[in-house]
Image: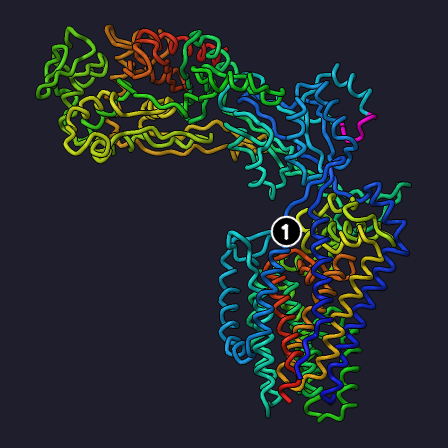
Amino acid sequence: MRQFDWVTLFLLVILLICGIIAIYSASTTQIGNDFQTENYYFKQIIWIIIAFIFMFIIIRIPYSAIEIMITPAYIISIILLIIVLFMPEIKGSQRWILLGLFNFQPSELAKLTTILLVTKLISKPHITNWQIISRSFLFFLIPIILIFLEPDLGTSLCFIVSLFVILAISDLSAFYIILIVSPLISIVTSFSLIVFIIYIFILIYILYKTELDKIIIGFAVVLNTFFFFITPFIWNSLKAYQQNRILTFIDPMRDPFGAGYQIIQSRIAIGSGGFWGKGFLMGTQKNLNFLPEHHTDFIFSVIGEEFGFLGCAIILLIYFLFLYRIVRNINALKRKEFRFAAIGIIAYLTFQIFINIGMNIGIVPTTGIPLPFISYGGSNLLINIMAIGLVLKFLNERSIFE
Amino acid sequence: MYSRQQKPLILNYSIVGVFLILFLSLFKLQIIESTKYTTIAEKNFVRIKTVFSIRGEIYDRKYRSIVLNKPSYNLYISLNKIQDKKKVTEFISQNFDLNPGEINKIIYDNRFRLYKDVLIVQNINFAKMVKISEQMNYYPSLSLKSEKIRNYLYNNHFTGYTDRINENEYAKYKEEGYSINSYIGKGGLEKYYETLLRGTNGYQLLQVDASGQNLQFFKHNLDKPPVNGTSLILTIDNDLQNYISSIFPKGKNGAIVVMDVKTGGILAYVSKPDFNQNIFSENLTAVQWSNITNDPAKPMLDRIIHGTYPPASVFKPIMATLALEEEVINEKTKLSRCEGGLWFGNRYFKCWWEKGHGRLNVTDAIKYSCDVFFYDLSTQFSLEQINNFTKENMLTIRTGIDLPGERKGFFPTRKWYIDNYGKYVGIIGHKVNLAIGQGEVLVTPLQICAYYAALGNNGNWLKPHLLMKTITDTESNYIQPEIRQLPVSQKNMKLMQQSLFNTVNESYGTGVAASLNNVSVYGKTGSAENHMGKKTHAWFAGYAKQDEFEIAFVVFLENAGHGGSVSAPIARRIIQYYYNLEKS
């Protein structure tokens, strides 16, 4: 029995409409009693229409047709990620392929193709732990490194999060997951020996409790110690500006004339919105500070200022219902690769929402990641809607592949 | 191990967790801390203030001012504070020479820069300022600021001028810290040394609340002090510059350059007519602007490096040294008899002296500036040979002076003639003309000055320059002159110097009007026929020596007559003035 999830689609449409309204306001300036609006909201509508056509095609064509395109699409996105490194810099990074009419961000395409390729590869039957790790790492690391070179730390981070979530829900045993995650913690703790020693004891305890072989525990400890010692070495070999870039990423307040200033202004905008907000088009802060980005990365600050806590809470609620509804239904998917791919996509979107809103209210680093479905942006919007199209397609077909 | 059904539960919990964190953070920000942020928003407490660097000043070689900064009162408008656009517009147009349409255009052009103050009127006089400041309280969007603008102490073409940055320049340079109200060098040294003169703007972060308490959002490197621009010390001598300006024939257009032979430093740089560079910071009206740009005398044209002219007889030393170097002639060789002209096929080329000079050697040919001698020489060389030798002597290539937009000049090639005259063009006739610096060859007065300086410096060609040093430089890092060699042997160089000396100091030499008793003057006259008028352009170029002082000069006057009678006497006065100055 086929059942299309109209409620999820409806929630998506509501989010897109909220986005258009916010973009309209964000690109409107007021001088005295005069209002001037740039036509970003109109372009966004065009993009939504194009994206829905793609979504419709994805839902209607058989999955086998999509399946054969996954590998070529992955290769194309890697090629595009290489090409983009030769593009002119925009604000200090090379993220866009300039096409005249619009700018295309290859990392958007790469995120979808990477998730689909890796989940397809690791959902094959009788697959070993080692095969899962090697395949997923290999095909994730290529785009992660290329995106890191742009440099786009935020998007690289999104890829890493998707990778871990996919590994976590895959058939990988818990030990391997700990083995993969633990060196990351070692890197973080490498700045203090005492913290690291405490961490190693906790690690040994957990591994011991899971009744693992002593040799394997030993291996995990050696691996972590290696990362602990190598990190300061790598850190010191970085140039001062590279260190600064990473430190500013972690703590934007180090850069009061750049990222830190934007975050403070965003906090002021959202905080001054209060409970009810200042009203549609009535925001005052949006025109005072981070002008070029408030219809893209800082769109949430416009919502927060003009629609207040009430508006923000409603947006959060719609997002939550939208994601939760999909996640709940994913459990029912019998075909493993559908389940993995859907979870990868949802993990990616959830992380983006968290990072973007978190950045706007100043609780996570500044990244340059747009807010899914609401921020203005062509390739980002297109890929996100196509990804949801795929998820809806999986859910739609859940009963056929019993 | 988790079961298949359990695993997505982790994701469920993560999503709930993520949204809970965001919800609680928003609650804290928008409900608990709302009052604090509302006040900050209303009062605009947290903002970056740009601290502008002071532009470097420009001085002459004896540390006397050429360009200074002076205070100016400017009116700014903050678009986000406009309450009634119509009223503000009316107020401005009533008090200043701006109509509402122009004001609306400024507002419209800056509609996406609401957070920045936009300059409306600059250089407001004191009386007007007192008058409007009484009414300013009614218009919170307007503010008066005291800033520095440029003051050019005399008209000249080398300092250039500064003006407000335009949209294109702003788009290009905004990453370098220019604001929409910035001034930027638009020509001359102001443009060439923009980076040095400008310095770097600083920033100040304001983060205080109404009671003056530090809000402490930022704890790291809060302020960045500005780095002021560097002042420039030029090789120019203000006394000589102003003297030349004062004796420049009234109503004539032209250029005079004086250069230090030993260093390549420019001592005087006069191009006439000139214009007052201060007009750009004094609310230049459209009428004033069109008066300047439509003036047929082109006051904004720097004739020294942006004007190119036929060199006429000042080109002759090039032909003479070419012939000597190629050993086509020696110091004794006499060529065809000058009977007032020479036949080439069925064309007769006239010498400027109709009665004829008779048969001459090279020294006398230069001294009398006999055309026939050089017509005759032209048959010995190909066009490409003459062209190459001209370039090896640094003519028709850029000298590389520290000014923007220098022109190259021109020397035709065979290909150029074929492209412009068709396939069967006769090159010989053109070449005959080129040998006396007429026809298509074009040079800048600066190239000629540098060439004659090199003749006076035994063939060492020095790159002309205006910057002696920056004010922070010590003696050790003065600008070192760039040296190149003219392709002429010392023996032939001595012969050429003797010829130029004879031109000025022997009777019947064309340059006798420049001779002085106590100074050795070397020079060459030129009278260039041209399409601009009936009278010839008057050239006189050369160098002068006394004790350790040696200067090269070029005096060039458009359509003024003969070099020997018009330009040479001016050169004489300049040389005399310079040596009296150095003695006293």
Q: Quadrant of residue B132?
A: top right
Instruction: Give the percent coordinates (x, y) of residue B573.
Output: 41, 8
Instruction: Give the percent coordinates (x, y) of residue B584.
Output: 50, 10
The residue that appears at 72% across and 29% down in the rendered structure is: B76
The residue that appears at 74% across and 59% down in the rendered structure is: A359
Amino acid under disc 1? Phe
Q: Quadrant of residue A210?
A: bottom right
- A351 to B4, vertically: above or below: above
Q: Is residue B142 magenta?
A: yes
Give whichever of B31, B402 is nearer the camera. Answer: B31
- A37 to B16, vertically: above or below: above
In the drawing, does residue A284 fall left or right of residue B277?
A: right
Q: Is residue B67 visible?
A: yes
Instruction: Give the percent coordinates (x, y) of residue B255.
Output: 41, 17
Q: Residues within 10 Å of mark 1 (few under 14, many from 20)?
A: few
Q: Is residue A141 visible?
A: no
Quadrant of image for the N terminus of chain B: bottom right
Give whichever of B233, B332 is nearer the camera. Answer: B233
Q: Dot 1 corresponds to which residue?
A: A42
